[in-house]
Amino acid sequence: NSLTKTAATAWGNAGAASTQTIVSGNGYVEFTAVENNTYRMCGLSFGNTNNSYEDIDFAIFPTNTGTVTIYEAGVNRGSFGAYSPGTVFRVAVENGVVKYYRNGAVFYTSTVTPTYPLLVDTALYTTGATLSNVVIGSGGSSAFARLRLACRGGDQGRQAAAAGGHGVRRRSR
């Protein structure tokens, strides 16, 4: 599944969350960065209250300058080098510890303990920003399911659900 932002450039007006969850134990969300000139975040959260990045408990933030930053519940944990189009990112819970991966290599380990169940949570800033090949996995890397997205955003969001989300267009593969 892939998302593309169609709403105006701003935080808080576009995002989606998964209907599937990681109930307990090990699991992950993985996505591919298609471009390196937009702002968007994707990660894992306990619950989902809005379209804002502050609502994502454990987020990877591929920036519009080609650098990757980690945010946890709205707190900037630092920048961790460059990325390019085609980079595969993963936020994983392994034995109760959240780890962040770039192309299969860990680049940050969180000190925050996750609360279950965890769902995939996204926030998109730049019009045209994409999150591509988004998957959620649970119970090991070999057992994963395609992400199913649920719209956020109140009545306006429910009306937009048929289009794939509030301020986003969804493509399923």
Image (cartoon, rainbow, N blue to C red):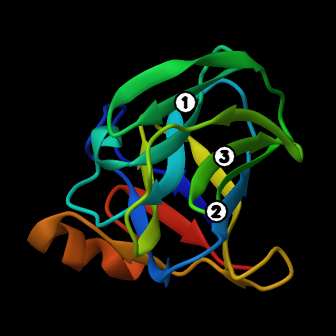
Q: Mark 3 points at which residue?
A: 99
The C terminus appears in which quarter of the rendering? bottom right
Residue 70, numbered circle = 1
Q: Name the kind of residue labelled 2 in the image.
A: Val
Q: In this view, does 90 lie above or below 93?
A: above
Look at 61% across and 16% down and name the residue there: 79
| Tag 3 near tag 1, CB within 8 Å | no
Q: How far apart are marks 1 and 2 (CA)?
A: 14 Å
Q: Distance between the residues labelled 3 and 1?
A: 11 Å
Residue 29, numbered circle = 2
Question: Observer-nearest residue: 21 or 171?
Answer: 21
| Image x and y of residue 80, in percent | 69, 19
In this rendering, which labeled residue sits more in front, label 3 or label 1?
3
Q: Name the kind of residue labelled 1 in the image.
A: Ile
| Image x and y of residue 105, in percent | 87, 40
Question: Observer-nearest residue: 96 or 12?
Answer: 96
| Image x and y of residue 170, in percent | 54, 69
